Structures are given as C-alpha cells and as structure tokens.
Image (cartoon, rainbow, N blue to C red):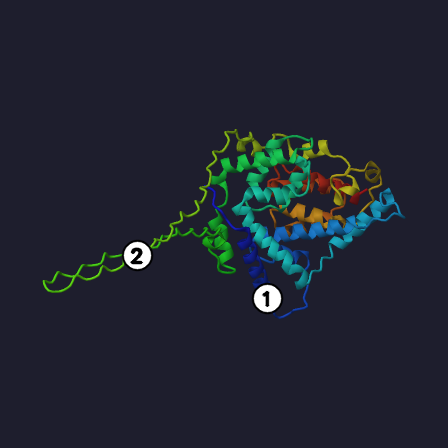
Amino acid sequence: MKDKYSQAKREQYGRRLAAHLCDQHFATQPAATLDGPAVLRFTPIRQVNLFVVQQLLAQWTGEMARLRSPYFDFEDADVRQALTQFMNVLSRRIKVTRAAFEPLLARALSDTLGLAADPAQAFEQKLLGNQPSPTVAQLRDSLRYIDIDKALFQEFIDSLATDSPLEREQVLSRFRLYQEANYKRRQPVEKLVEEFGKLLPLTEAELRESEPAATPTPVAAPAPVVQAPVAAPELAAAPAPEPEPAPAKVMAPPVFDPVPVAEPVQVAPAASVAAPRRPLAEATAPSGVPLHAKLKAEHTTTPLSETLRPERSNAMLAEKAPKVESLREAISINQRFSFINELFNGENMEYHAAIQHLDTLPDPDTAKRYVSEDLAGKYGWVRKEEHVNKLLKLIDRKFA
C-alpha cells in the first residue's frame, strides 16, 4: 500500500525541471523579472505555483520580522498601522529575477511530488510548519496553499473542531492514521508523474528508492585432490625399488561462514482507531440560513494586524482602522491569494473583475448585497464565511 519514494531523487528532478523551465522562459530575455500574476501561472501545474507563492510570502514575513530595533517601539499602534500599509504596498510589487526564482521553483516542484508521494510528511512541513502548538485557525490558513487532495486535508482539519492550541505530535499521529485509512481517495502518484512528464520526461520508477544490492555469499575454494602414488608393477629380476617418501599433506583452505545479514523485523502496526471525521454530507450541506443574514449576524471589526500577523489580535488597531480609497489597493498579497484560492476557485481574472466592480459601487449596502447574493450564488460560497467576512470588513473600511 505504501511505496517508498526517494526525496533525493525528487529534489534532483526538481532542480533539472526548474532549470529547463527557466531556460524556456528567460531564453530571449535573461534580465526579465516576474510579478505576482506571472508566478501564479508560471507552470501548468497549479500546486507548483502555489508552493512558490508560499515561499515568497514566507520571505515577506521574514523581512517584516527583521524590522526591529532596541531604540524604537515597533509595537506601537501607529507604527504597526504604518508598517501594515507599507507592507501591503510592497506585497503588490513582486519583482523576482531568474537567479532568485529558480531555487524557489525547484523546491516547489520537489514539494509537489512529495505531497502526493508522502502526504504525512507534506502535512508536517506545509501545514504544521514550525508551530509547536498549532491551532485549527492556523492550519486552515496554511490550507490555502494546498491544491492536490485539498478536500482530504480540509476534512481532517474540520474533524479537529477545537479553538484550543493542539499538541503537534498528537495532531501528526492522528493525520497519519487518517491518511492511511483514506489512501484510496488520494490522487495517484502516477497521475501527477504523468503531468510532470509532459514538462520533462519522468517515470514513477525513477522516483522510487533504489533496492539495496544483495550481499554475495562467499564460496569456499575446493580442497585440492591429492592422488595416492601408484606402485610400479613387480619384476622378477629387478631389485625392489626404494620406497618414495610420502607426500606432504595439503591442508584445505579454511571456510568462513558469511556474516549473517539481519532480516528486517516486521513490526505489526498498533491497533488504533482512525480519528473521527465529519460526514461529507454534513460538511457540504448548506445551513439553511441565508448567507446574507448569517454574514450580517457574524460581522465584526477585523484588526489591521491580521494582514501582517493573523495570529495576534490588537483591539487598538481595530479601533483605528483607516478608511481606504479602493479595495484593490487595500487588499494585501496575503489576502489576495487567499480570496483567489478560496472564493474564486483559483481564477485570477475573475477575482480582479469582481474587485473592480465592487470599487465602482456607490454605497456599502449595494456592495454587500453584490457579495452575499450575486458572488455567493455564482461561486457557491458554502462554509466560506471566514473569507467572505474579511471581504465585507474591507468594504466597511472603504465606506467608513
């Protein structure tokens, strides 16, 4: 059921394919750069592009984290507000050269193959990350970069159903049980390998772990055969021949038994019960409450710091949320990718058309009706309240 795939071979193929794709793109324009939309459509495999974006956002967050000084108060509300606006502007100015982009692409290619080959390892690296005590909200936030088998990851996260911090190893253990129980529902590795093979030849066998060479069994050299001397026939008149000296004994070389190779111990998996999962019917069934009414009831003010550090709320920033002139300029790169993936089914152009139309509407009521009725109906926004609420809060800021 579980095939062994080599991470080293995935990484090697990722580097070769990244160089091949970059050669094609930058061949006629070596000094060209890529912006955000270009990154999102660089390869025909959407998962690869999303993993590149995830790395870019990690770099973006790291740049922000380094803006600290013992001489200035970077936690002051006004400073954080100004930094948030600055980073939002900067995030819309992605400019990546080939030298910076190719390593990101190579890793994204390898990680995409790993997502299908070893989902448990991918869950640990891509969703849990470095969080020692993750929360369900953080896992859902990381889920926006997952395209392959996203429904399975979403179903597992929904089964956790708690707002309290989780114990990392316990979550990872539960996910291993979950993915083993649902392995038949996963996208086959062969299908993904076929997609990669269209870009640069690849077979599933080339990704497998090499079989260890069998240890040859030493064969003892045969002992030399020593023939007994043949006596000469007796002659009547001939004197009896003197006896020949007995030949020295020839010892056969010692035979060494080969060092026994330890057989791998087969350990039976511990009996366990897969983590309870919410039935699919329940997970996708509408609540029966109109989306407009539900969103209106749950509508609250969002802290500005959410666009920078979603896990930290700041009531002071929420009270000082500034008015924005346009939604297009107010939406950060983090929110934009989240909206495109979660609300517009990954369609970049449809997202831009909807935001552009919202910016032309005259008042907040008209804008909210367009979101909760027109867009929600068109894209089937069931269980998308978290992302829709963020969009509605931006509308409030625009018309504040």
In this orientation, which residue lies closer to the viewer: 73 or 289? Answer: 73
Quarter of the image for the N terminus: give it. top left
SS for dot 1 = helix
**Mark 2: few, some, or many residues within 10 Å (few <14, many ≥20)?**
few
Label 1 belongs to which residue?
23
Res. 374 in view: no
Gap between marks 1 and 2, in whole Å?
Answer: 66 Å
Name the residue carrying label 2: 224
Residue 225's spot in the image, x, y percent?
A: 27, 56
Q: Which secondary structure, mark 2?
A: loop
Determine crowd level at label 1: few under 14, some 14-19, many 20+ residues with C-alpha closer than 10 A: some
Q: Amino acid at mark 2?
A: Pro
Q: Which numbered disc flags the more N-terminal residue, 1 or 2?
A: 1
Residue 127 image point, x, y percent:
63, 42
Three-letter amino acid code at disc 1?
Asp
Image side of residue 13 versus residue 69, left or right: left
In this rendering, is residue 214 above or below 17?
A: above
> Could you say where residue 358 lies in the image, as x and y percent from the top left?
71, 47
Residue at the farthest right position: 71
- Residue 27 lies, in percent from the top left, at 61, 69
